[in-house]
Image (spheres, rainbow, N blue to C red):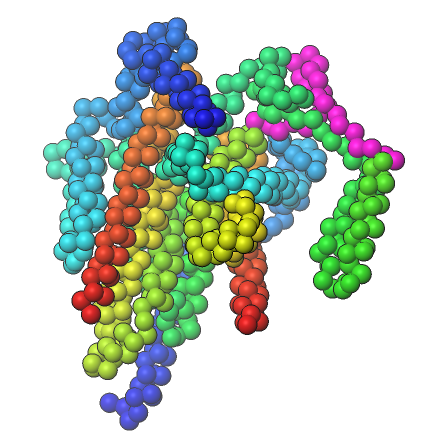
């Protein structure tokens, strides 16, 4: 009873703030006249800035299309049916199309990456970071399991250093130090540097997951493959690695959820992802101070994305458990 | 074709090692070469001599160690390190405490309570920590001014100056005695049977010292536009601490819940059959068993809390990352400050990893002793 009362005591003011007393249309002064409720008119006015950042308004169809391409690729990757070689080709093609749309080729006006922002940037950093980080992570994991000492040491050093420091340190390293280490005269785009940093960070975490998967594959698999006459490398590539990757797909999903949220840290190096555009929208002098509405709005977007991914992870785990049961019954 | 398969394998391994080593060394040399060239072009030289130069900037939030702009950069970094340590230490303790309570409540028999806890955990787990941090920090800025401060409890003031709490001043003698108690507790096993008696004597001494020099509770009061007395937590510190605690408590509650669920049902049923109450079963059977599964994950959570405390940069709390970043930008010694940052965080992560390994070996040894 007491708990139910507390639930009601939390829910009622929340509903009143978000719906009953909220201002849905009008200007900032209309909102300020009704301070007891949320100001959704602010979101309405600032929607295109929050979602697309500084991208030129006339060209908004391009980031929309690029985002759809990326989302289609993500959905495709999520379907176990599509886990084959063609997926790599699809990603390469899709990423080129998305990049061409965002940047502009052919007759399209060129939009430099300094003007990219909002949701497309958040999705791009997450998806491209994980997709580029994945092969690198597999290489690092194989390196750590290698029988030779030199690759093992190098891979272990990279993985442990990257996992041992905060993402902010890796971002600073990429933006402040890495340009110094390039030959004179080469200027690298800041967003690209951030993207590389995110990919390397993702690779270190994915490498640990893959290593765990490799450890879980029974020794007998490797021995059986060797006995069939496969070389060590062939056995790894055709037998052990595919099984290991299947085992660790659920932990990939939780890493992906973490990265979707952690890309928000690029605020600190001054790039415009979804969280930063929302914050800047509330710093506009005309609409100063509607932070709560801005954060609630992007919070809902992050929530939907993360929750959908986690649900998918649960479904995948359930499906794998069901498949395992079927195999056992067939025996 | 070689005569023995072993010889060809050894040769191949040698080639692989040589090639990876060569490629890595070449890449590193190339990067270092470029770096030295660009440093030369900018007229900079490497070295840690800048640490003794005066800092020339203020630090808004200091604890234990006072700081003024004419003091050295090295001291500024130390102040930042202490700030990181302060927010992480308090954060870890609070996050584990809150996470424990929430984790247990999520298994409660009351559906409303379970639902509320689940909703809270889901919201926090599915939104970025930075979002929570910015939200809390802007909310704290929107608080009333000091003269209209909120008073959630007697002696507590919540305003745009931060959270002001009553401070408790304990006499120096009591502090030393309490430290001795902790020391003996830590060394108890080495001291054998006498250990507990020493602890008891020391505790009695602590009690006596508190009778003769009672600890004083000082409540803050408003003078003009500011508070005098008490302990003040700055708005940035309060926001960072609250965000870290909420975010990590949500994660820890999942760990706690999972660990409790992993305890075999038979153990609980047996405890209930022996006549223990539900709470006793939880306290004396389930949690001690679950603790084993939990400890490594709790340690990982604490490490990630310490790493996440670097988000302080986003709201202007002077932690070690934000001070290193400021000095790097001011003096141009970005490479050196980055090295310090990496060494600080890496030594911490490696220390925790080593401690965990030791804990796991101890557990394995204990398991081996069981019949």
Q: Position of residue A280 (x, y in %)?
A: 38, 24
Measured along the vertical axis of the image, is residue B357 above or below residue B94? Answer: below
Q: Which one is in front, A96 or A160?
A: A160
Q: Position of residue A250 (x, y in %)?
A: 31, 53
Q: Position of residue B29 (x, y in %)?
A: 42, 62
Query: As drawn, is A237 to the left or to the right of A191?
Result: left
Position of the N terminus of chain B, as image quadrant, is bottom left
Snapshot quadrant of residue A59: top left
Query: As drawn, is B195 to the left or to the right of A122?
Result: right
**Which residue is painted at 60% across and 28% down in the image?**
B234
**Which residue is painted at 39% across and 67% down in the image?**
A144
Snapshot quadrant of residue B80: top right
Position of the C terminus of chain B, as image quadrant, is bottom right
Question: Residue farthest to the bottom?
Answer: B3
Measured along the vertical axis of the image, is residue B48 above or below residue A122? Answer: below
Q: Which one is in front, B309 or B116?
A: B116
Q: Is residue A16 visible?
A: yes
Snapshot quadrant of residue A14: top left
- Residue B242 lies in magenta, yes or no? no
Q: Position of residue A82 (x, y in %)?
A: 15, 53
Query: As drawn, is A172 to the left or to the right of A328?
Result: right
Q: Which residues are magenta?
A: B212-235
**Which residue is painted at 36% across and 19% down in the image?**
A15
Query: As drawn, is B73 to the left or to the right of B112?
Result: right
Q: Is residue B309 visible?
A: no
Measured along the vertical axis of the image, is residue A54 above or below residue A36? Answer: below
Measured along the vertical axis of the image, is residue A9 above or below residue A69? Answer: above
**Which residue is painted at 83% across and 50% down in the image?**
B201
């Amino acid at each position: 009873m007491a708990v139910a009362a507390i639930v009601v005591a939390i829910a009622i003011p929340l509903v009143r703030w978000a719906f009953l007393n909220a201002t849905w249309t009008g200007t900032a002064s209309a909102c300020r006249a009704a301070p007891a409720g949320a100001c959704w008119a602010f979101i309405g006015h600032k929607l295109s800035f929050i979602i697309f950042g500084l991208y030129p308004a006339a060209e908004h169809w391009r980031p929309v299309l690029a985002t759809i391409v990326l989302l289609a690729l993500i959905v495709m990757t999520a379907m176990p049916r599509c886990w084959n070689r063609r997926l790599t080709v699809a990603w390469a093609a899709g990423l080129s199309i998305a990049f061409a749309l965002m940047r502009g080729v052919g007759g399209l006006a060129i939009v430099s990456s300094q003007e990219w922002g909002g949701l497309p940037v958040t999705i791009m950093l997450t998806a491209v970071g994980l997709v580029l980080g994945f092969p690198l992570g597999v290489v690092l994991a194989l390196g750590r399991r290698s029988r030779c000492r030199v690759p093992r040491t190098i891979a272990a050093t990279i993985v442990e250093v990257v996992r041992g420091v905060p993402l902010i340190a890796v971002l600073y390293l990429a933006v402040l130090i890495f340009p110094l280490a390039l030959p004179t005269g080469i200027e690298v785009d800041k967003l690209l540097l951030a993207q590389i940093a995110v990919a390397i960070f993702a690779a270190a975490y994915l490498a640990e997951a893959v290593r765990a998967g490799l450890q879980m594959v029974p020794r007998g698999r490797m021995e059986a493959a060797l006995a069939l006459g496969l070389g060590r490398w062939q056995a790894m590539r055709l037998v052990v690695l595919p099984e290991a990757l299947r085992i660790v797909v659920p932990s990939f999903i939780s890493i992906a959820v973490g990265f979707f949220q952690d890309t928000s840290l690029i605020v600190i190096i001054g790039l415009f992802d979804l969280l930063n555009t929302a914050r800047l929208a509330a710093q506009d002098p005309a609409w100063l101070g509607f932070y709560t509405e801005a954060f609630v709005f992007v919070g809902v977007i992050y929530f939907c994305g993360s929750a959908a991914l986690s649900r998918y992870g649960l479904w995948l785990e359930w499906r794998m458990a069901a498949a395992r049961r079927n195999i056992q019954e067939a025996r | 074709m070689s005569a023995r398969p072993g010889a060809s394998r050894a040769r191949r391994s040698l080639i692989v090692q040589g090639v990876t080593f060569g490629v890595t060394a070449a890449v590193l040399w190339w990067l270092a070469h470029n770096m030295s060239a660009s440093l030369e072009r900018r007229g900079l030289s490497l070295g840690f001599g800048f640490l003794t130069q005066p800092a020339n900037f203020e630090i808004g939030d200091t604890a234990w160690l006072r700081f003024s702009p004419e003091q050295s950069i090295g001291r500024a970094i130390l102040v930042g390190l202490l700030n990181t340590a302060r927010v992480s230490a308090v954060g870890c303790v609070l996050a584990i405490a809150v996470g424990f309570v929430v984790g247990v409540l999520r298994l409660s028999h009351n559906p409303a309570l379970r639902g509320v806890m689940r909703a809270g955990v889901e919201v926090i787990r599915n939104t970025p920590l930075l979002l929570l941090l910015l939200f809390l920090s802007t909310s704290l800025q929107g608080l009333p001014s000091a003269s209209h401060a909120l008073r959630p409890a007697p002696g507590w003031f919540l305003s745009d100056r931060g959270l002001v709490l009553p401070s408790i001043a304990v006499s120096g003698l009591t502090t030393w005695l309490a430290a001795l108690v902790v020391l003996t507790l830590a060394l108890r096993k080495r001291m054998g049977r006498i250990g507990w008696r020493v602890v008891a004597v020391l505790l009695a001494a602590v009690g006596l010292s508190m009778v003769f020099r009672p600890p004083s509770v000082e409540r803050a009061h408003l003078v003009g536009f500011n508070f005098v007395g008490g302990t003040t937590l700055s708005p940035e510190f309060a926001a960072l601490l609250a965000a870290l605690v909420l975010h990590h408590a949500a994660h820890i509650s999942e760990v706690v819940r999972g660990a409790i669920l992993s305890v075999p049902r038979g153990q609980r049923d047996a405890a209930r059959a022996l006549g223990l109450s539900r709470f006793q079963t939880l306290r004396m059977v389930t949690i001690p068993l679950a603790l084993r599964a939990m400890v490594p994950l709790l340690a990982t959570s604490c490490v990630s809390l310490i790493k996440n405390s670097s988000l302080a940069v986003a709201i202007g709390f002077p932690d070690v990352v934000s001070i290193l970043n400021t000095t790097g930008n001011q003096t141009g010694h970005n490479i050196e400050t980055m090295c310090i940052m990496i060494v600080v965080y890496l030594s911490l992560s490696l220390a925790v990893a080593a401690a965990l390994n030791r804990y796991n070996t101890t557990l394995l040894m204990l398991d081996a002793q069981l019949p």
